Image (tube, coloured by chain):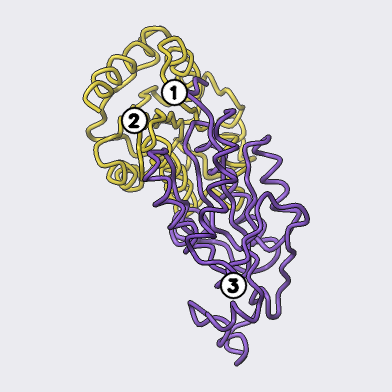
Chain colours: A yellow, B purple
Amino acid sequence: MSIAGQSITVWLTGLPSAGKTTLAKLLSERLEEEGIDHHLLDGDEVRTHLCNDLGFSRKDRDENVRRVGFVANLLSLHGTLTICPVISPYREARDQVRELHDGRFVEVYVATPVEVCEERDVKGLYAKARSGEISQMTGIDDPYEPPLDPDVVVPTHELSREESVELIWDAIKSRLSPL
Amino acid sequence: MSIAGQSITVWLTGLPSAGKTTLAKLLSERLEEEGIDHHLLDGDEVRTHLCNDLGFSRKDRDENVRRVGFVANLLSLHGTLTICPVISPYREARDQVRELHDGRFVEVYVATPVEVCEERDVKGLYAKARSGEISQMTGIDDPYEPPLDPDVVVPTHELSREESVELIWDAIKSRLSPL
């Protein structure tokens, strides 16, 4: 395969309402300013086009992570920096995606404590989980395994959005130059 | 999204053993020679990584086509010419993929007659279908709807492999320049 120049995948993992999508969008704007070819693999886009058969079992969540990882790897292999905001609760599946990327992978742990996530509750899912309306909610009655050795940790409850994005951008910059 | 330059998707549709994968590989070599960034979305790769839940019902076949089309569109949007050898038996699903690509789509009908395909029988599937060992075999007991207005028609039974690839390359060349 002719490849003009390879890029990386920036994988944002964290609890629901941790701020993954918000940071992904701000990062996309930052990359736009820098003129860097990139793609935000949006969760809704992925659910509709790649994963409409998947539910919330561990098997299905891992399969979701694998499919997103597969697409991100292709895009970044061909030079498009790919941003993936995905809960991706299980360490093993994330590590498989990292392995697939053969070094072109930046794992960002959006490390917002569950109390703060629940207070934000962007999609109202925590409230629904507490009332018993839904189950298998990551952070409530479904596990989340934090990364053991992430490339970046973003404590969004202690930083401004701008500071959070700069933290990620700093980590990316150093990884883009040698490629 | 910053996009360096858009490219196209080359979609090869046709019966099993029509020669789609062979032509896709030769086309990939041709593009390699030309130094054009491209990706062959191989059928096995797709089955393993994107579609391991899908079978041979019309619904599943169409979903397979949609997922491959979604990924091809992303890659080609970001400048990677994407080659998709996919049986894709139903016209409607192929037309949806064409629409998604908003003009950046070249449909190649690998128009090998079923008798010739059956004689080649690369994977031994025609024999298995005739003996009743498998069912839902496209061209035998499952439909194939030929394109009504393909961009290229390749009668592989009347042309050499080299001639077939040149036919596709000629059609691609004219589509790459204005992008």
- Hey, what amino acid is under mark 3? His
Q: Are marks 1 and 2 in contact (CB under 8 Å)?
A: yes
Question: Where residue A7 is drawn, which disc sits there?
Answer: 2
Residue corresponding to mark 3: B157
Residue at 60 percent of width and 45 percent of height: B171
Q: Residue A175's x, y, as percent?
A: 25, 24
Q: Residue A159's x, y, as percent?
A: 37, 9
Residue corresponding to mark 1: A37
- Up-down relation of residue A64 to residue B130 (above or below): above
Question: Where residue B124 is drawn, which disc sits there?
Answer: none
Residue at 38 percent of width and 24 percent of height: A110
Precedes in sequence: disc 1 or disc 2? 2
Residue at 34 percent of width and 27 percent of height: A109
Residue at 24 percent of width and 35 percent of height: A148
Q: Chain of mark 3?
A: B
Q: Residues within 10 Å of mark 1 (few under 14, many from 20)?
A: many
Q: Residue B45's x, y, as percent?
A: 43, 57
Q: Residue B126 falls in which quadrant of the image?
A: bottom right
